[in-house]
Image: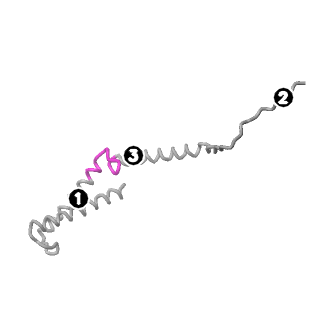
Amino acid sequence: MNKAMIESYLRNLLGSVLGAITIVMGSTGIASPLEFGGAEWLLVANALWASAVPTLLRWVNKKDPAFGLVAKAVTSSVTKKLEDAAVEAAKKPAAKKATGDKKPATKKATTKK
């Protein structure tokens, strides 16, 4: 769960930082991020906390099965159901193979003396 949350945050971080750099470049007329000064990098730094907002919202959402507050309970519940299904499948006898060339049973003729 933590790995998924970190990966989600990193995706949001990358998108937010790239968006912030693009916006700062466009609004200040600077051609390259290499020319940014301290003020421009402070604007971009706001993307660090802003990118955490979507991840935190998913974490707080009780209904989010990926990594919300109930994700651990959902994960354990699903794991238990899968394990129970595997045990039930192992208990069932193997199905008999049907053959199409069976001959019908014949009755023996009885004779009276």
100 sits to left or right of 72: right
Which image quadrant for residue 14? bottom left
Q: Determine whether the residue tagged by mark 2 lies in a helix, strand or loop.
A: loop
Callout 2 amino acid: Thr
Residue annotated with mark 3: 74
Query: Of the residues shown, which amino acid type is indicated by label 3?
Result: Val
Residue 39 drawn in magenta: no
- Magenta residues? 56-69
Q: Crowding near pointer 3: few (<14 within 10 Å), some, many (20+)?
A: some
Left or right, 76 with respect to 108, comes to left
Element at label 1: loop
Looking at the rendered structure, which numbered label has been put on residue 3? Answer: none
* Mark drawn on residue 110: 2
Check if residue 62 falls in the magenta segment.
Answer: yes
Residue for badge 1: 51
Give x and y (percent) for residue 35. 13, 75
